[in-house]
Image (cartoon, rainbow, N blue to C red):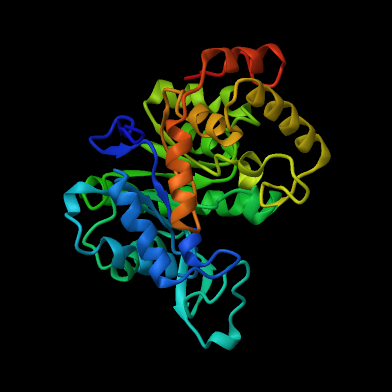
């Protein structure tokens, strides 16, 4: 089977090693119809995917609304949902809202709120938008430099540890959520959070991929030691590991710089020698590390989802990984399938 189950770190949760990343159904960059959104969730279910990740940010609540609708009549004990805290949504006239980068999103404004009370309200609002009785995993969202800038991040991270973290601890103790963590774009923030707090897992976007493995230095070893699970978002580095080094290829949500394009071309060449699609190698690489429980590639169409399933099933010879390492394109200490 392409999709398998894995234990989520030290918790009793079992999730599938590929999840459904629900950011695109929040109409990221361009709209997706209700029919396509529902069809993707149904296809994910048919493929055996039982882990679904969303957030209030995604489409200003639209992702949670759509995902909840599609899962509403599924047996609740057969799937795992993660969502996030750190932002509150408030109703507002559409003409007054800056939706970028979302399109035709929910009629809500967003504001950061990492306070204890704000975290409690955020999770309550998520449950209402999704029309389900519980969230399994709650991540503190975007308390990173990428989102806030270097100086403001220090302030927001402190607020998150003093507010959101304490609220999530209480909710975990009460059994309202089963696991708590942090979801950001930087492994350094995850590492600092794990040093300071008793977290079960992390959602790390784009910072452990076939292109970059700096999180092997400190963060992933500490996760292994503490039995903290990691979910990888952005495992294709915002697109370049899916498209290859084509003109306009995206890396980290922006046009890829020349050094990244050059490295991807070299990785592509090795993959071509072994008749392995670049994205197949990129997605299968993620799951070789023992701390990584799942990855959540985003899809815009059922066809893209079918392609992801095919990529994680594609046979890859061991020689591919050896050649990438000997060429200096993959760290020597990076685990491989």
Residue 254 in the image: above or below residue 37: above
Residue 136 in the image: above or below residue 133: above
Residue 251 quadrant: top right
Residue toward you, 174 or 312: 312
> Residue 80 vs residue 249: left or right?
left
Residue 170 in the image: above or below residue 112: above
Residue 124 can be seen, yes or no:
no
Residue at 74% across, 44% down: 246
Query: Residue 179 appears at what percent x and percent y?
Result: 31, 43
Residue 196 can be seen, yes or no:
yes
Query: Residue 55 appears at what percent x and percent y?
Result: 43, 59
Query: Residue 5 appears at what percent x and percent y?
Result: 29, 33
> Residue 185 vs residue 268: left or right?
left
Q: Which residue, as the protein is rendered here, is positioned at the far right? A: 258
Residue 156 quadrant: bottom right
Residue toward you, 14 or 236: 236
Residue at 49% across, 21% down: 221
Residue 323 in the image: above or below residue 1: above
Number of labelled discs? 0
Residue at 45% across, 28% down: 287
Which of the image's four quarters has the N terminus? top left
Residue toward you, 43 or 251: 43
Query: Residue 291 appears at what percent x and percent y?
Result: 42, 26
């Amino acid at each position: 089977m392409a999709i398998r189950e894995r234990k989520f770190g030290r918790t009793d949760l079992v999730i599938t090693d590929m999840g459904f990343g629900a950011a695109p159904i929040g109409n990221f960059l361009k709209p997706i119809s209700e029919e396509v959104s529902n069809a993707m969730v149904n296809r994910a279910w048919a493929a055996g995917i039982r882990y679904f990740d969303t957030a209030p940010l995604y489409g200003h609540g639209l992702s949670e609304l759509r995902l909840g609708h599609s899962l509403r009549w599924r047996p609740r004990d057969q799937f795992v949902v993660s969502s996030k805290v750190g932002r509150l949504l408030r109703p507002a006239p559409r003409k007054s809202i800056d939706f970028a980068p979302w399109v035709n999103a929910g009629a809500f404004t967003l504001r950061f709120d990492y306070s204890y009370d704000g975290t409690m309200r955020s999770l309550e609002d998520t449950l209402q938008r999704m029309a389900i009785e519980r969230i399994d995993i709650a991540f503190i969202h975007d308390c990173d430099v990428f989102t806030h800038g270097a100086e403001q991040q220090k302030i927001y991270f402190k607020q998150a540890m003093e507010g959101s973290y304490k609220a999530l601890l209480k909710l975990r103790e009460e059994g309202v959520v089963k696991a708590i963590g942090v979801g950001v774009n930087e492994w350094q923030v995850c590492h600092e959070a794990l040093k300071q707090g008793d977290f079960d897992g992390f959602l790390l976007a784009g910072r452990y991929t076939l292109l970059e493995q700096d999180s092997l230095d400190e963060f992933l070893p500490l996760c292994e030691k503490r039995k903290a699970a990691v979910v990888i978002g952005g495992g294709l580095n915002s697109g370049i590991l899916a498209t290859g080094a084509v003109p306009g290829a995206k890396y980290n949500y922006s046009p890829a710089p020349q050094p990244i394009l050059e490295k991807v071309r070299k990785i592509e060449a090795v993959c071509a020698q072994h008749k392995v699609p670049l994205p197949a190698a990129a997605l299968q690489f993620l799951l070789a590390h023992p701390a990584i429980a799942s990855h959540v590639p985003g899809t815009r169409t059922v066809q893209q989802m079918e392609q992801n399933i095919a990529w994680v099933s594609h046979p890859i010879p061991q020689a591919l990984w050896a050649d990438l390492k000997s060429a200096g394109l993959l760290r020597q200490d990076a685990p491989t399938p």
